Image (spheres, rainbow, N blue to C red):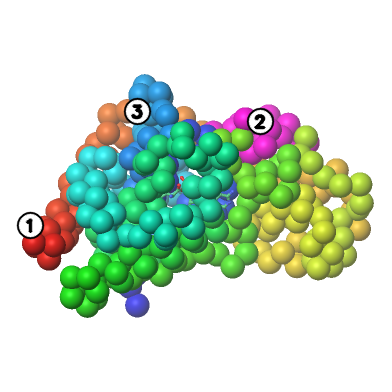
Amino acid sequence: MSKKIFSGVQPTGNLHLGNYLGAIKNFVELQNEKENKCIFCVVDLHAITVKQEPKELKKNIRETAATFIACGIDPAQSIIFNQSMVSAHSEAAWILSCVSKIGWLNRMTQFKEKAGKDKEKASIGLYSYPVLMAADILLYDATHVPVGDDQKQHLELCRDIAQKFNNDFNAPDFLKVPEPLIQKQFSRIMSLKDGIKKMSKSDPSDLSRVNLTDDKDEILNKIKKAKTDPLPLPEEAKELAKRPEAENLLGIYSSLKNQNLEISVSEFSGKNFSEFKEKLSETLIEKIEPISKEIKRLLNDEKYLDTILLEGFHEADKMASKKIKEIKELVGF
Ligand code: TYM
């Protein structure tokens, strides 16, 4: 059955291995199932829920589009566009925020984490962020949404919002309730410096992540310095439960190789980390170096990137304008 795929990535700089293995790699696989229709969005409206430097944001929007293409998203096959160019996203987000309950949003763990201790100082945008995310998805009648594990709760909320809107306006099945696509394994890549912390662009230490723009030497250095534990690698996968760093590094290796964790465990069973790290670096360089080079090449061609985003805008805008018109009609505008 053909799927309508929608997903988004924030243009906040430092797209990293977690974004790649948890989401973008999966985007490419879904695109390559020819019958699917795929839409990938650079979600700049989401980015400004925390303060951004305007010049940096502009650069990061192009860099995110370049990263999509460098990772294998083909603009001739998939739509790549920039969220803020399609005004229906903001309009739908407002309307959906009027059917969403405060109690639902109060449960969002990502807001709690991002806002930290001083919630009073967080922006309203950061709080209502998942409603905008629901608008993104529902405007396109997306059937499937590939994301990393950290977005699971936001997708559950999106489903609740769709159902509530359909109920409130007596329009069964009008907003399509989407299915999350979260990989069973390796959907949460952890920091290289701490196996219980998610790999993240906001970590102040660049050594905590492999960026998709890193070159060979940076990758070698980061893997060399990645945290481990004093034991040799385990003989069985179940022994990894208490060894988060070993589990994460073996997970990264397995995901890059498209192989089960168990196979990687048996490949390195009883070996030292130094031997494993050599293999891991080699595999990472093989995968990431071409992506990194291609991102840099594309960034020198701003005209090309802007053309792709403009073409994507026209296609996305056609779909979203139609849907927002129907939404407004139902609401009574
Ligand atoms: P963002 O920009 O934080 O991350 C983009 C994608 O990368 C995944 N990801 C990870 N996966 C595994 N391990 C990690 N350490 C890791 N870090 C990030 C995220 O799960 C995500 O899939 N709210 C979304 C963007 C968004 C969106 C949407 C997604 C806006 N509208 C509509 C889907 C549909 C976000 O902030 O992703």
> What residue is at 16 percent from the left and 56 percent from the top?
324
Name the residue nearer the viewer: 41 or 98. 98
Q: Marks 2/3: CA distance?
A: 24 Å
- Percent x, y for residue 245? 77, 49
Assess whether mark 3 and mark 2 are in contact (beta carbons under 8 angstroms).
Answer: no
> What residue is at 46 percent from the left and 34 percent from the top?
121
Front tag of 3 and 1: 1
Q: Marks 1/2: CA distance?
A: 49 Å
The disc, 2 or 3, on the residue closer to the chain's N-terminal end is: 3
Q: Badge 2 local density, few (<14 within 10 Å), some, or many (20+)?
A: few
Circle number at residue 333? 1
Residue matched to label 3: 58
Assess whether mark 2 and mark 1 are in contact (beta carbons under 8 angstroms).
Answer: no
Name the residue nearer the viewer: 22 or 113. 113
Label 1: element kind: loop
| Type of amino acid at the residue the image marks with label 3 | Lys
**Magenta segment range?**
204-224
Residue matched to label 2: 205
Label 2: element kind: loop
